[in-house]
Structures are given as C-alpha cells and as structure tokens.
Image (cartoon, helix red, strand yellow):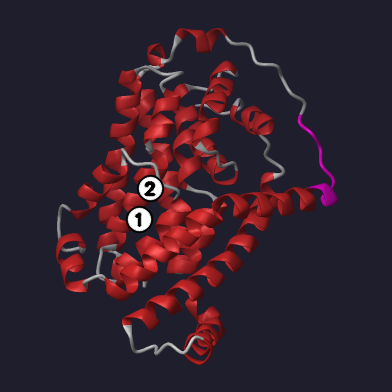
C-alpha cells in the first residue's frame, strides 16, 4: 500500500525541506514528515473507504439487519451476525437500542453478542486507517480476526445459557416495527457522501491527535527500550496491552497512528493491535451502557471471553509478523 503513495512521500519531503526549511536528517524533520504524510494518506483512504462501505451499508439498515438475523440460528446465526457487523458498525451510544431490538425480535443472545462484538472492532474508518498505516495484509487479517472473535464470543455465550442475565424489562419491550426504506441509486450515493462528511467530521480531531502523538514517538521515542519491554519477544506484552486497554475509552481512529509509530520502534504488531481491539470492543463507556440491559455476571463473562480472544489474536499477530510486512 505504501508503494502507491511514493509520490506523496516525495512531495511531503520536498515540502518539509524546501518550504519549511527543516532537514530530514533531524528527529524533528522526521516527525514533521510523519505527521503530514500520514495525515494526507489516511484522509485520502478514509474518504474512499467510508464512501464505498457506506454505499454497501445503505442496503443494511438496522431494520433489515434484524430481519436477516431472525432467519438464522446456531453457529450459522453467529457467522451471519458477525459478518453483518462489518457493514453495520455502531458506536457505544447505540449498543443499548440495538441490543433491545435484537432480543425483542427473538434473536438468540449469542447471535446478538456476535454482532455486538464484531461491529465496533471492524468498521470502514478503522479499516481505511489500517490500510494506510500497515498495508492490505494486516488490514484484511484484522477484519478476519475481528469477525472470528465475534463468532467465538457469541458461541461461548450461547453455551453458558445466560438468558436469565438479561434484565427482565428487556423481554417485555415491544418495539415498533419500522418499514425498510428502499433507496434509489442516487439516494445511496447521497447517503454514502453524507456518511463521509459525518464520519470524517467526527473523527478528524482524534486522527490529528493520534498522528501528532505518533509523530513524536516516531522521532523521539527510544526504540531499544520499547522493543525490550513491548516487543514480540516479551511474552507478557500482549496481555499487558489488553489489560491496559480494557478500562480505557479511546477512538480506534486515533490509536492506529500511535500503533504505527510504536511498531516502527520495535513494539510487536500483535501488542499494538490487541490494545486497539480492547479499547474499541471493551471500553468502559460501552460496559456502563450495556449494564442497563444485562446483569454484571454477563458483562464479566462477555469481557473475559472477548478479552481472552483478543489476547490470543495479539499473540497470533506477533507470531506471523514476519509474513505481514
């Protein structure tokens, strides 16, 4: 992927050296180049990916997603829910109404959780930034592992038969059935374009902050120290990364440039990506909101299953890192 942007790399280098008058041989020059190059590259890919996925998503509004999942049960239902989570991402603020809607429709608890796990981990914005930062191999594998985590998490929750851990009032709610709106091609294009403006407008500040921090790390962080304590050879690095990420709230868009800079300094790919997954899928605000509809025991089991799965994925990424670069 970076080969596609060789022109941009050279253009930014000319800007830094000839316009800003900063030598590329200095740490400051390297940081400034990282900031401008990553910002432009990520915004280009972000716009393209959000438009493409949003156009696809126009075929899967929440009402249609619910209707599709009503047809499946068992492992097939978990797989379908996790796959639909790719094109129908939600933020933590929408987890409660989606959960209620799925349960009210009679969708099994495990299938519901397959959707709730995959949907925040895998989204078009994160995929675009991953594509820009790490290339297509890591971006695609990130999506695949996010789907697998959702499938496994949902299946495990089904095995425990935890329906009694859902608050009783949820089963008593009758949500109005909304008619699925049929859009024309022009309306779908308009929907996709509005999504580009809305999502970029919402995440740009996180993106700039993340790239800024990444630029500082890229130019100044001591590579030997980071490689020693957070590199792939440290057997506890992934576990610590996930444990730190679980209680935090962080936007995935902002953490990816930081992860990119850390990896360039020797931090394990799996450590950086598992930290991202933990903050996205298991953020404290999301757990607080889910407490409104499920009991503490189910929350604890959900966090444990998802957390352990993310740790496993982190170690997997570190093991095959040489094949991903």
Q: Which residues are magenta?
A: 180-187
**Residue 82 position within the rendered picture, expressed as x and y whole percent measured from the top left:** 50, 40
Residue 288: image quadrant is top left
Of 147 and 237, the residue lying toward us: 237
Task: Quickly name the residue at label 1.
Answer: 273
Q: Is residue 213 above or below residue 85?
A: below
Q: Residues within 10 Å of mark 1 (few under 14, many from 20)?
A: many
**Residue 191 position within the rendered picture, expressed as x and y whole percent measured from the top left:** 75, 48
Residue extending farthest to the bottom is 18
- Left/right placement of residue 235 relative to residue 48 reads left
Q: Is residue 47 above or below residue 67?
A: below
Q: Is residue 295 above or below residue 61?
A: above
**Residue 74 position within the rendered picture, expressed as x and y whole percent measured from the top left:** 47, 28
Residue found 57% across the figure and 40% down from its top: 84
Q: Is residue 244 above or below residue 64?
A: below
Q: Residues within 10 Å of mark 2 (few under 14, many from 20)?
A: many
**Residue 316 position within the rendered picture, expressed as x and y whole percent measured from the top left:** 28, 56
Residue found 52% across the figure and 38% down from its top: 91
- Left/right placement of residue 255 relative to residue 81 reads left
Tag of residue 213: none
Residue found 20% across the figure and 66% down from its top: 226
- Tags 2 and 1 touching, CB below 8 Å: yes
Q: Spatial distance from mark 2 to mark 1, Cα to Cα? A: 6 Å
Answer whether residue 124 is magenta in the image: no
Tag of residue 277: 2
> What is the magenta segment's predominant secondary structure?
loop
**Element under label 2?**
helix
**Element under label 1?**
helix
Residue 175: image quadrant is top right
């Amino acid at each position: 992927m970076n080969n596609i942007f060789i022109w941009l790399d050279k253009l930014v280098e000319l800007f830094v050296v000839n316009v800003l008058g900063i030598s590329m041989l200095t740490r400051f020059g390297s940081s400034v180049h990282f900031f401008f190059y990553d910002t432009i590259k990520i915004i280009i890919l972000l716009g393209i990916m959000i438009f493409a996925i949003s156009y696809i998503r126009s075929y899967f509004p929440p009402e249609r997603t619910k209707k599709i999942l009503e047809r499946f049960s068992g492992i097939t239902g978990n797989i379908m829910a996790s796959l639909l989570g790719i094109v129908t991402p939600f933020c933590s603020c929408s987890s409660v109404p989606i959960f209620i809607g799925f349960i009210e429709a009679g969708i099994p608890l495990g299938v519901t959780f397959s959707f709730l796990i995959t949907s925040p981990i895998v989204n078009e914005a994160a995929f675009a930034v991953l594509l820009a930062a790490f290339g297509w191999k890591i971006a695609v594998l990130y999506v695949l592992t996010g789907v697998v985590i959702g499938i496994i998490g949902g299946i495990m929750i089904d095995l425990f038969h935890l329906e009694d851990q859902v608050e009783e009032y949820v089963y008593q709610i009758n949500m109005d059935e909304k008619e699925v709106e049929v859009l024309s091609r022009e309306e779908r294009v308009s929907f996709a374009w509005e999504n580009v403006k809305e999502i970029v407008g919402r995440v740009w500040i996180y993106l700039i902050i993340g790239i800024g921090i990444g630029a500082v790390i890229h130019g100044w962080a001591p590579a030997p120290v980071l490689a020693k304590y957070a590199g792939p050879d440290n057997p506890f690095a992934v576990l610590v990364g996930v444990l730190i990420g679980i209680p935090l709230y962080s936007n995935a868009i902002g953490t990816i440039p930081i992860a990119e800079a850390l990896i360039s300094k020797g931090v394990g790919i799996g450590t950086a990506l598992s930290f991202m997954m933990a903050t996205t899928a298991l953020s404290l605000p999301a757990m607080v909101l889910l407490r409104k509809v499920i009991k503490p025991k189910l929350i604890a089991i959900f966090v444990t299953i998802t957390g352990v799965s993310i740790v496993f994925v982190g170690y997997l990424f570190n093991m095959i890192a040489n094949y991903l670069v």
